[in-house]
Image (cartoon, rainbow, N blue to C red):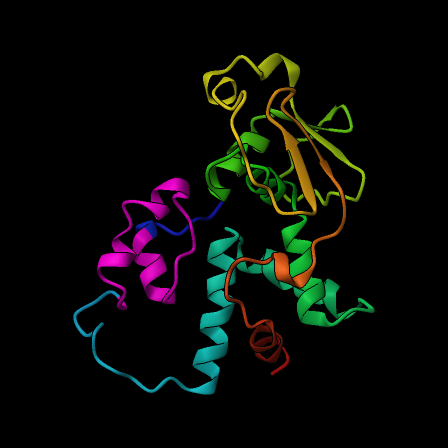
Amino acid sequence: MAKSTNPDCKQCRREGCKLFLKGERCLTKCSFDKRPVVPGQHGTARKKISEYGLQLREKQKVKKAYNLLERQFRLYYEKATRSKEGTGWAMLKMIEMRLDNVVYRMGIGSSRTESRQIVNHGHITVNGKKVNIPSYQVKVGDVIAIKESKQNLEMFASLKGLKVNPPKWLEFNTESLTGKVLAEPVREDIDLNIKEHLIVEYYSR
């Protein structure tokens, strides 16, 4: 799969906000806190950004935060245009309910990239069946668990008894290493500062 080769911290600086691409490290040793300017020789210079530039940067920010390719992102937008909900929110909700993001939100993976690898390697089950597709759309009532035969792996055994704080639409029991989708997310559950109307405007040009 195509992937940006730029350092994670540089991507955050380019988008002007923390994208939490390194998980817990973003809360402690983060270069964005020390140098929150656009990378490059002229990063500190003030530049007026066009309307198109604002729309593009907003799209890129969400793509990088959720680790999506352009084709994937465009497909979410096209599906959202057929939704009865507002296009921007419908798109974000579909992205938020991807299995790799749910694994991250439950605290199983420390970042979305790690969570995608966990799903890809077949460590996760949905309703008792192994699912190794990161883009799999979870539904309300789905039971998400770490595969029983993988629970003794160090990365999962270390979760035992830990206190995690998933968003209110999810729950995760660190004793049984099992979680559940309690509801669909609401707009307030998105912790990134996203202006989805700019993304809709970008694709509506």
Q: Is residue 86 left or right of residue 57?
A: right
Q: Is residue 131 left or right of residue 201?
A: right
Q: Nearer the viewer, residue 182 or 84?
A: 182
Question: Which residue is located at x 79 percent, y 44 percent?
Answer: 140
Residue 30 location (% of width, % of height): 29, 50
Residue 204 location (% of width, % of height): 64, 80
User: Which segment did they paint magenta?
Assistant: 9-38
Q: Does 116 sit above or below residue 91?
A: above
Total labels drawn: 0
Question: Which residue is located at x 78 percent, y 28 percent?
Answer: 127
Residue 59 location (% of width, % of height): 51, 68
Residue 67 location (% of width, % of height): 50, 50
Q: Does 103 sit above or below residue 189?
A: above
Which quadrant of the figure has residue 198? Answer: bottom right
Is residue 75 visible from the viewing direction of this image? no
Q: Nearer the viewer, residue 183 or 65?
A: 183
Q: Does 113 sit above or below residue 127?
A: below
Residue 11 within the segment the image draws in magenta: yes
Q: Nearer the viewer, residue 120 or 183?
A: 183
Is residue 190 visible from the viewing direction of this image? yes
Which quadrant of the figure has residue 201? Answer: bottom right
Quadrant of the image for the C terminus?
bottom right
Q: Nearer the viewer, residue 126 or 53?
A: 126
Question: Which residue is located at x 28 percent, y 68 percent?
Answer: 38
Question: Which residue is located at x 76 percent, y 23 percent?
Answer: 128
Residue 28 within the segment the image draws in magenta: yes
Q: Is residue 189 left or right of residue 156?
A: right
